[in-house]
Image: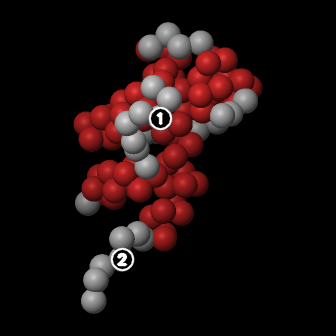
């Protein structure tokens, strides 16, 4: 029997706990490190300007996020994709696979 491609428990944990922290890190990288205006990040991510502010102040997506080299590279790819109108691809499954690798 084939192993399932996804583990619903890991996907659930990822969606509830990990992705908000990663989005906060993405927002911080775009605004603080790359100098992109908050309104531009808001537009490109399709979230409110207030949400961007909350990510930056860690009112959203708070918690420790230790980044492996693979996960840091994944965030860089995500930032590139956001700023280049979707050219280059990254999926939640890519992030999940990377997180699953870190858990081992």
How many residues crowd around disc 2 within 10 Å: few (fewer than 14), some, or many (20 or more)? few
Q: Which residue is mark 1?
A: 86
Residue at 59% across, 12% down:
37
Q: Nearer the viewer, residue 79 or 54?
A: 79
Colour scheme of the rendered structure: secondary structure
**Number of numbered discs visible in the structure rendering:** 2
Q: Does residue 47 lie above or below 103 as drawn?
A: above
Quadrant that contains the C terminus? bottom left
Mark in front: 2 vs 1: 1
Q: Position of residue 99 (x, y in %)?
A: 36, 52
The answer to whether one can see residue 83 in this image is yes
Q: Which residue is mark 2?
A: 4
Residue at 27% across, 41% down:
70
Q: Nearer the viewer, residue 87 or 79?
A: 87
Residue at 56% across, 43% down:
20
Q: Position of residue 93 (x, y in %)?
A: 41, 56
How many residues crowd around disc 1 within 10 Å: few (fewer than 14), some, or many (20 or more)? few
Residue at 46% across, 52% down:
92
Q: Position of residue 39 (x, y in %)?
A: 66, 17
């Amino acid at each position: 029997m084939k192993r399932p491609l996804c583990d619903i428990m890991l996907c659930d944990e990822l969606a509830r706990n990990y992705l908000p922290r990663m989005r906060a890190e993405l927002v911080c990288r775009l605004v603080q490190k790359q100098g992109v205006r908050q309104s531009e990040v808001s537009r490109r991510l399709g979230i409110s300007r207030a949400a961007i502010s909350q990510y930056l102040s860690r009112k959203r997506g708070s918690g420790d996020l230790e980044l492996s080299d693979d996960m840091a590279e994944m965030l860089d790819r995500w930032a590139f994709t956001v700023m280049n109108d979707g050219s280059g691809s990254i999926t939640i499954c890519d992030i999940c696979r990377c997180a699953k690798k870190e858990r081992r």
